[in-house]
Each structure stands twice: as C-alpha cells, then as structure tokens.
Amino acid sequence: MSELVRPGRFFDSGFGDLFSWTNDPFFRDAWNLIPRVGGAESQLWSPRIDLIEKEDAFLVKAEVPGVPRENIKVDLKGDILSVSGEKADEKKSDEEREGTVFHRMERSYGKFERSIRLPKQIDKQGIKASCKDGILTITVPKKHVEKSESQKIEISYE
C-alpha cells in the first residue's frame, strides 16, 4: 500500500510516541485532563430530567445525587418551572490534600439550573416536590377541564 493513502501513517512516524499516553487507563479521556478554571463555584452542571405525563398530573424527575434538600430551589414563574441549586465540592484542608493525586475527577460540583415550559392546563396551587435517594420528584397536577358534549351544527344551503 502506498504511503500516501495508508491510514494512520502519521502515527507510525516518530510522532506516534507523542500520543502513547492516551493508552494509559488513567488518561483515556483527554478532555477530563483539562483543569477547571475558577474552581467549583463557577462550574454549571445540569441535572438529567424526565418529564412524564399521567392522567391527572405531570411528573418532573431530576437526578440530584449528593445535593442536600436545603440546597435545591423549585420555582414556577408563569409556565416555566425551574430547578436550581448547588452541590458543594468536598473541600479538604491542605493537610488532607497533601500527598493526594487526583487521576480523574468526573463528578460534577457547583451551581446548577434547569428550566422547562409546562403546558397551560396545570393547577399551579397544587404543585408538590419531594426528594428521595437523589431523585427530586415534582408533581404538577392538571386542571380538570370539563369536556363539553359535542354539538352537531347543521350547514345551510343558500
């Protein structure tokens, strides 16, 4: 096969060793090596949510593991439901961190906010929220709209 068309020929050259660190199990994901600028306080993360419709209510379930209930705020403004809060970093003193090397930090810390638009047919006064095992569940009852009977309308010919 010709050198010009063989895939990967660049890595066969002397530069191939430059990237050998990517095979190390601690450093397979190079993006996790980028340091966090400004500390955990400036980081935003977004909890994963499920929006479920039942016959009588909508359920919003958000993953907020490790976030104390008192650090979570649920707010409704118009038809926008917002969940916000903060997950504190596990701060340790300099003495505790001395001699410690973090090979990977994947857990998210810092402030978070997530907003979704709710349908118009909700009972705003009946909204409830609970948190158990790192799952925030917000129950948004539907307004009971009476279904009117169908009325047939005759079309006249002119």
Image: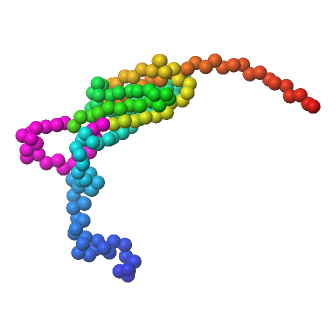
Residue closest to the eye, 133 or 107? 107
Q: Quadrant of the N terminus?
A: bottom left
Furthest residue in direction right, as rendered: 158
The residue located at (29%, 42%) in the rendering is 43
Q: Which of 126 and 150 is in front in this view?
A: 126
Which residue is painted at 42% across and 20% down in the image? 128
Residue 18, given in percent of the width and then of the height, sits at 22, 68
Q: What stretch is highlighted in magenta?
A: 90-111
Does residue 105 belong to the magenta stretch? yes
The answer to whether 52 appears left or right of 17 in the picture is: right
Instruction: Report if residue 71 lies within the magenta region.
Output: no
Q: Which colour scheme is used?
A: rainbow
Percent position of residue 6, x then y: 37, 76
Q: Which residue is drawn at 13% across and 37% down?
A: 92
Vertical arrangement, residue 139 with respect to residue 50, above or below: above
Left or right: residue 38 versus residue 73 is left
Residue 77: name its quadrant: top left
Q: Does residue 90 sit above or below 120 in this rendering? A: below
Which residue: 37% across, 36% down?
113
Q: Tell me if residue 29 can be seen.
A: no
The dominant secondary structure in magenta is: loop
